[in-house]
Amino acid sequence: MHTCPFCKFDDNDISNTIIEETNNFFILPSKGSLCEGYLLIVPKQHIFSMNELTNPQKSILMSENFYN
């Protein structure tokens, strides 16, 4: 069983690090071993992999306007 690392944050931890948010996704700065400056686009729906997104969900991701 996989544990979602984003569910381990309490609401204050997440809200203090969110760069941008839409109805379906939020963007966080990368932390840890990834290169500095990378951003994580995190779906609000729990999925294990981007491969689990349905075609309609992929369309929503591609059409999101993160930076108005």
Image (tube, rainbow, N blue to C red):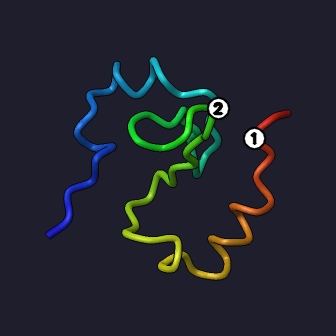
Image-quadrant location for residue 14: top left
Residue found farthest to the right: 68
| Position of residue 51 in the picture relative to residue 32 (left or right) | right
- Looking at the rendered structure, which numbered label has been put on residue 66? 1
16, 33: nearer the viewer: 33
| Label 1 secondary element | loop
In the image, residue 63 sits, relative to residue 42, either above or below, namely below
21, 41: nearer the viewer: 41
Q: Residue at x 45, y 23 (%)?
A: 15
- Looking at the rendered structure, which numbered label has been put on residue 20? 2
Q: Do the residues labelled 1 and 2 touch (CB within 8 Å)?
A: yes
Image position, residue 59 (x, y; %): 74, 71
Image position, residue 11 (x, y; %): 33, 26
Q: Residues within 10 Å of mark 1 (few under 14, many from 20)?
A: some
Q: Residue at x 20, y 57 (%)?
A: 3
In the image, residue 36 sits, relative to residue 45, either above or below, namely above
Q: What residue type is labelled 1?
A: Phe
